[in-house]
Amino acid sequence: MAPIVRHTVMDSPYEPLTLVAVDGVLSRVHMTGQRHRPPEETFGEPDPRPFREAIRQLDAYFAGELTEFDLPLRLIGTDFQLRVWEELCRIPYGETRTYGELAELLGSPSASRAVGLANGKNPVSVIVPCHRVIGAGGGLTGYGGGLDRKQRLLAFESGTAEPAALF
């Protein structure tokens, strides 16, 4: 039996976010114009019902009231990607890690480039916080949603920008 895929679109400070669920479980969050955004025909039928809690938590996050998401996710990727995305979820709100630090934590110190590639393929923007990963020298490096969004998310989480400043 084929999986049931549904989607909805919600407003955010970063333009609309498209949320996609597979069999009722959140599996993707895409920003407008995001690199690696799949074609819209893969998003399934519009149906807001599977997304009530995800929308509630994202709204609370953007209001500065939530620092850690508690949502079931159905992440689809390679074993390595899944390990990277799991490690991303361990980066605390307001903190950053380098690609090299993540590679070390994964037990593959020479895999920082592979970590970067997996990070870039993260299918659940914001909730799986790939924006918290920076370059070795502390500089902002690639972000599927664009460096401007990454900079604004990091400023927001570090307390140097108010939620309203995200718009």
Image: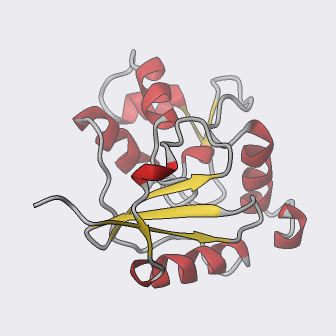
Q: Is residue 140 above or below residue 43?
A: above
Which x, y percent locates residue 86?
35, 50
Quadrant of the snapshot with the C terminus: bottom right
The answer to whether 87 appears left or right of 68 in the picture is left
Quadrant of the snapshot with the N terminus: bottom left
Query: Which image quarter: residue 153?
Result: bottom right
Q: Nearer the viewer, residue 87 or 6?
A: 6
Q: Residue at x 51, y 51 (%)?
A: 40
The answer to whether 40 appears left or right of 76 in the picture is right
Which x, y percent locates residue 13?
77, 65
Q: Nearer the viewer, residue 95 or 117?
A: 117
- The residue most toward the left is 1
Which x, y percent locates residue 94?
66, 58
Q: Residue at x 33, y 36 (%)?
A: 81
Q: Residue at x 28, y 33 (%)?
A: 80
The answer to whether 66 appears left or right of 78 in the picture is right
- The residue most toward the top is 110
